[in-house]
Amino acid sequence: MARTARFRACPLCEAICGLELQYEADTLVAIRGDAADPFSRGHVCPKGNALLDLEADPDRLRRPLRRRGKDWEEIGWDEALAEAGERLAAVQREHGADAVGAYLGNPNVHHFGHIAYLPPLLRSLRSRNLFSASSVDQWPSQLVDWLMYGHQFLLPIPDLDRTDYFLMLGANPVASNGSLMTAPGIARRLEALVARGRLVVVDPRRTETAAIASEHVFIRPGSDAWFLVALLQALLALGPPRTEAYAGKLNGLEPALRALQAVDTADVEARTGVPRARIDAIAADFRAAPAAVAYGRMGVSTQAHGTLCQWLIQLVNLVTGNLDRVGGALPNEPAFPVTGPGTAAGHRDRWRSRVRGLPEFAGELPVSVLAEEILTPGEGQLRALLTCAGNPVLSTPDGRGLDRALAGLDFMVSIDVCLNETTRHAHLVLPPASPLTQPHYDIHFNAFAVRRVARLSLPLQERAADERADWEILDGLGAAYAAAAGKPWRPLLPPLALLDAGLARGDSGLDVAALAAAPHGLDLGPLRPSLLSRLETESGAIDCAPPLLMAALEALVAAPADAGGLRLVGRRHVRSNNSWMHNAPRLVKGKPRHQLMMHPDDLAARGLADGARVRVSSAVGSIETDVVASDALMPGVACLPHGFGHDRPGTRQARARDVAGASYNDLTDPSALDPPSGNAALNGLPVTVTAA
């Protein structure tokens, strides 16, 4: 049978690689990289090929499920949506608006139908109990962008393809494919950088990215802020800030730099493990480079000083003149605007969580409070929950505690394609049809890309009559809830019309017709300086010394020194994407990837052997797993991947259930936070390791 090629962007990670999907009639039979995509240029990782498994997954749900005791029954869409809407409304009638909450998982941002159609439903609920994966991931970056530049998504992106010196902290894009830095084929891009300049990776582990870098620098987990303060001091000792390009657009730089220079960093090597001479050399090379950029990701965000680290990184780029500069860090100008009029700039502390009193950010509460808001009786107790494309039992702090909390909800409805460790607690599960049956445009990943690009993915195949698109489910649930609650409901336009309206707000001149005529996507050119003309701060300038960040610096200085002991950090693998791909045979085959890594000296000190079964314990729990010796780790550091632990009863993911591994988040502490943002401090976790 003859094959036909159809094209779209991969929906599985931030790299948004172009895919060529080969069909025989209407059956998907093969996938490869789209060589004609001007951005990804034929690159594809194992996850792209795994779409074949996800499409054919026998455990994938196709029709709504309703719980009947311990069993499930399939029901029709009209009945499912009506019941979900009525039960959510009933909980609010009896207990108030905040008694219903919502949790949104990482995959939501990968689907236009989710990211565009969820907001009206959430606004209709009028609940303060909204949560998402962002507070275990990227809130420090968003908060700093809002405080300094006036918008949470006015995010300077490393100009990866044109920089000469890249200082990377706590990131492993060769494994993650990039994060808040959309760059398909990133290993190739980094290798090109190393050939023309320098890539310096600062990380407690010699990662896959560090292996191709010009230099790798070990650092103790959680000490990045001290490294960055010392780096800024070294930069300022080399000469005055290079801020001529920002004249008239800087507010508070002098007090910020005075506060930084007043910090005593004499013991920086003892705190970080990085020699002062190494810091000074990095500062000299950074300042001398024709173009340089500093960037930090998960390792610096998911720690107790995450927001402080992200502020200091912005200051490194600013004082060296590399902010909003070619080859430095520049915000993208996407065809579909995510900043400017009509977008959500951000806000903080308009309300607080009921139990612990933690401030909201951008309309959400830290997910670390979700379990306590369910378990703690009293007015405003969370009694019903909507989850959408998320598995917080495996991906948020103290997963076992949250697991217990979800079991006690009065009602839970999940928009998801599988019964996983979280959705097994639902009373109703509403599964969207395959993404290949729906139009898609990457609103945020185009906005975080290292080039200005745009690509529309049109449906490649028809969905069955008894399937619903994600946007249809969200619109239908919103209408059913509004009818039951006696509220008005105004459905949004269909996706392509909505996309056209969004494109019209930008200045690219593109519309849906133009994108549809370019099935491989469009390259709109390199990043360009635009930050200074797009600032949304009240001052109209870059706010360099926001009080919240100055207080975070004071808190760093006042904090007691690290007491030592073993510290746990996470890791990613190119074949894994959080918890939701372990049911794909192509991704779980090969060598096991679940083990705890420890330095040989740390194993010997505990009388443990390579390959032993060990117990890992923290302040909130313990797990058992296998340990492997690795000199790629700094002594005193243990490393465990997240997203594993598919051993709960009641799930329906046969392949994932057989994957060895325990959940990282059975160890993480919901009280461990980055205070300014409320982001979970998952990295640098104190643990003990003993023989099991």
Image: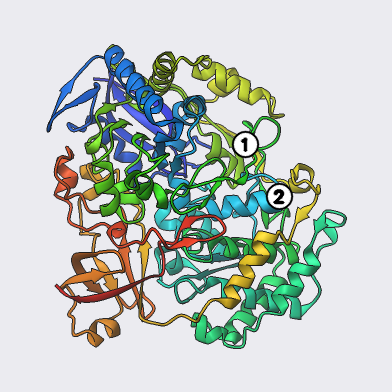
Give the answer, above or below, for where 253 lies relative to 390: below
The spot of residue 505 in percent (x, y) is: 68, 26
How many numbered badges does the structure rendering display? 2
Q: Amino acid type of disc 1?
A: Ala
Q: Are marks 2 and 1 in contact (CB under 8 Å)?
A: no
Mark 2 element type = helix
At 52% across and 17% down in the image, what residue appears?
A: 492
Give the answer, above or below, for where 527 lies relative to 27: below
Specify the label residue 344 is tagged with. Answer: 1
Specify the label residue 149 is tagged with. Answer: 2
Furthest residue toward front:
378
Front residue of 559 and 307 = 559
The spot of residue 482 in percent (x, y) is: 44, 17
Specify the label residue 225 is tagged with. Answer: none
* Among the 4 quarters of the image, the one containing residue 101: top left
Q: Would residue 292 be seen by someone viewing this image from the given angle?
A: no
Quarter in which the C terminus is drawn: bottom left
Q: Residues within 10 Å of mark 1 (few under 14, many from 20)?
A: some
Q: Residues within 10 Å of mark 2 (few under 14, many from 20)?
A: many
Drawn side of residue 669 relative to residue 259, left or right:
left
* Among the 4 quarters of the image, the one containing residue 671: bottom left
Drawn side of residue 436 relative to residue 301, left or right:
left
